[in-house]
Amino acid sequence: MATDLRLRESDEIQGDIIAGFKKDNVSLLFLKFEDPNQARDWLRQLAPQIATTRQVAAFNEAFSEARKSSGGDDPKGLKATWFGVSLTYEGMRVLSATDPFEKAPPTGSGLEAFKEGSAKRAGALGDTGDNSPENWLFGNGRNQPVHAVLTIASDTEQDLVAAVTAQREAAAAAKIVTIFQQNAKTLLGSRRGKEHFGFKDGISEPGVRFFDRPNPDNPEEVDGHPGTRIIPAGEFVVGEEPAPGSFTDYPDWARNGSFQVVRRLAQDVPGWWAQVSVKLKELKRAKAVPDTATDEWLAARLVGRWRSGAPVCKHQDRDVPNDPKASSDNNFDFRDDLEGLVTPLWSHLRKSSPRAGLQAPNPSVPPLDAKDLDGRRIMRRGAPYGQPFDPASEGPGGPDDPRGLLFVCYQANIQAQFEFIQADWIDQPDFPPGRNPQPGKDPVITEADNVDFESRGPDGAIRHTPLSFQQFVQTQGSVYAFAPSISTLKALADGRLTGRSQGQQGGQTKPQTGKAYPADEFLTVPDQWRTGGQTQFWACHGDQYRKISVADGSSHTDRTVKGDSRLSALPCFQGVGRIDCVLPMPDLQNPGGKSWSWVFHSTGGKQQYRSVSITCGGSHTGTLERPDRDLTAWNSLNGVERVDCFLPVPDQQRVGGKSWYWVFHTSGGRQRYRLISVADGAAHADVCERTDRELSQWSSLNGISRVDCFLPVPDRQRVGGKSEYWVFHGEDYRKISVADGSGHQDRVVNDDRSCSGWDSLL
């Protein structure tokens, strides 16, 4: 049975949420809107630039494969710059000119947390004293409110600087104030992948159902990553199924989005390490640790891992920096260490993600299983900022130089996930609960004035040594925001929270009656091309299809002929979860009452194609003529990872025994196009006539980052030397024309409109 990885194909979910930008250079711009209309115009221009999950997942996979091929080196020729945007509650109010909540959010919910914002909730999270909002650099809820957070991430510093400059200029032109800019960058050399205290970061990120490929032998874990649990997607993406018992009552605008927490956490590196040294001496005087214990030994227990990332529970005596498997090891839990004698109960690792082995207050109750905590997971996307600490430096890198962690996380429920972890676990001395003495707070990132260090004495009894830790991590800014779906971003750019109040099609205005159904592909019903002034198509979307008709004439009235059915109901589409695109065989349209096509579809994240035929007549029976094959069987598609759509060259169909097509395809997360030809005859020999070019070569596709499919306007093919097409991208479409002749000049006939303007796609 094919693995369902449908979220990898999402053009609705922003790319940083579950795919992850994973760039060495990051900048966050905290923005304030001064003029709502200009802010909407800015968002309208920005929306097509926002990276989607499909783009980022494809790039990351290509990057990973290239790194394997090069023996572990980063591929120099493969790079990208990604954009993401999130909006605060006030930012959404400004853009939509209305309250995002029709009624007050439920008390104690994540929606309430989003509406109130992080400054108002700071006290409950331990952000008091030096950490209180009055000392924050951004997000303090006072003079300069944050309306939007623009994330810019790039493989190179040069590309990041260029992108940030362009985005700041675009914001300024729209009367948007950049109130703060936070840069972050992967540390270099031996510090790569580590935070400023020196420990490897980001090891314990969860897998996501319908995105990460499960282990065939253990479907609860990510394939190739033992111990990495696959968490229900609804814990990170609103509208997907969450873990049992999680909150699900979200407004429509939240679907396919995720709530974001951003925090600037300053780190006093020399102070933290000096404290470790002092506490080690206290423990040695109390004979609570071995005489051979070092600062590294104690620091590893505070964190729960050694500097390399190797878990203390598997490597109790020393680090193993030369063992790459140990540095990314998640295949462990704490069921055999319920008392915390090996990995302390208050270690950062156990406080932030207790895994299997969390003991209830009643010792007669078995420890919780890891799956019982699925609803408390978050997706972290942080990065260090500032220069690494260098005690000899008088400039950058010195003890007073700003440095720390830019903490970013995504979740469906801020209260039940981020806030719960922070307030009920990390900052709660009585967690794990029901112990005497209490374990204490997390000493890595909080002020932990009464930590219980447990050890076993010579008589075998457990000994308790109290320790007090000062706080050397300071909160210097925090924002709660929401990363909307691409559709919601476009709606907000029109001053609405969802959809449009009216849609247009063919010059006629019609009231909107529901949410649009953006098609993946259209397949012409073989014997229904311009029959009686109507043309019928099958519109495919996800694992379903419906039959629609489009009338000739200036209005091109459309209607649904037959409602949705499952693709799997047709024998020729058994095993197909979603049709990516279809290419009719040029010389096999209606001979002998059958029309043949190549159908491209993805299974388990890999695209394949098959040959099918559909009979003419009322039943339109579909037959699988040739089973799935890899793209490598097409000479013209060499180097193509995924075909998105074909556009026939209008005046080059079956000319001289061959037909020409523009092939739009995605590689490395970016869509390009090439020109190919397919010959008549049994072999259908194909040739790449012109190599890849950028979408920017098409003036009619300006502003589109990815074309989903083309639909020919039936009565506007080869009319006056031009052919017209509807171009579908995301939840919008536009009409373009392509001229006959060597230049095949193209232009926009109608600008973008919502797919909700099509009655047949509602």
Image (spheres, grey):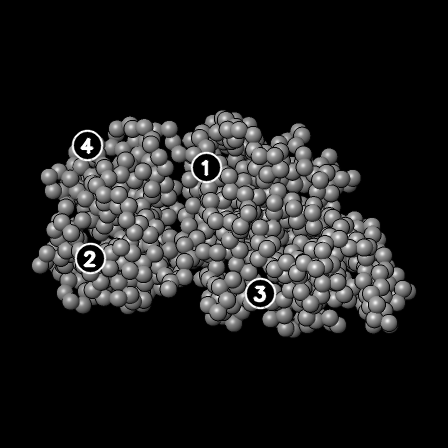
Which of pointers 2 and 4 lies earlier in the amino acid sequence?
4
Which of pointers 3 and 1 lies earlier in the amino acid sequence?
3
Callout 4 amino acid? Ser
Which of pointers 3 and 2 lies earlier in the amino acid sequence?
3
Distance, label 2 to label 4, CA atoms, is 33 Å
Residue indicated by mark 2: 622
Distance, label 3 to label 4, CA atoms, is 60 Å
> Quick one: 576 or 680, which is closer to the camera?
576
Residue indicated by mark 3: 227
Distance, label 3 to label 2, CA atoms, is 44 Å
Which of pointers 3 and 4 lies earlier in the amino acid sequence?
3
Distance, label 3 to label 1, CA atoms, is 35 Å
Callout 3 amino acid? Gly
Residue indicated by mark 4: 554
Question: Element at badge 2?
Answer: strand
- At which x and y percent is residue 126? 73, 43
At 65% from the left and 56% from the top, the residue drawn is: 353
Distance, label 1 to label 2, CA atoms, is 37 Å
Please say if 277 is above or below 243. Answer: below
Q: Are marks 2 and 4 in contact (CB under 8 Å)?
A: no
Residue indicated by mark 1: 252
The N terminus: image quadrant: bottom left
Distance, label 4 to label 1, CA atoms, is 34 Å
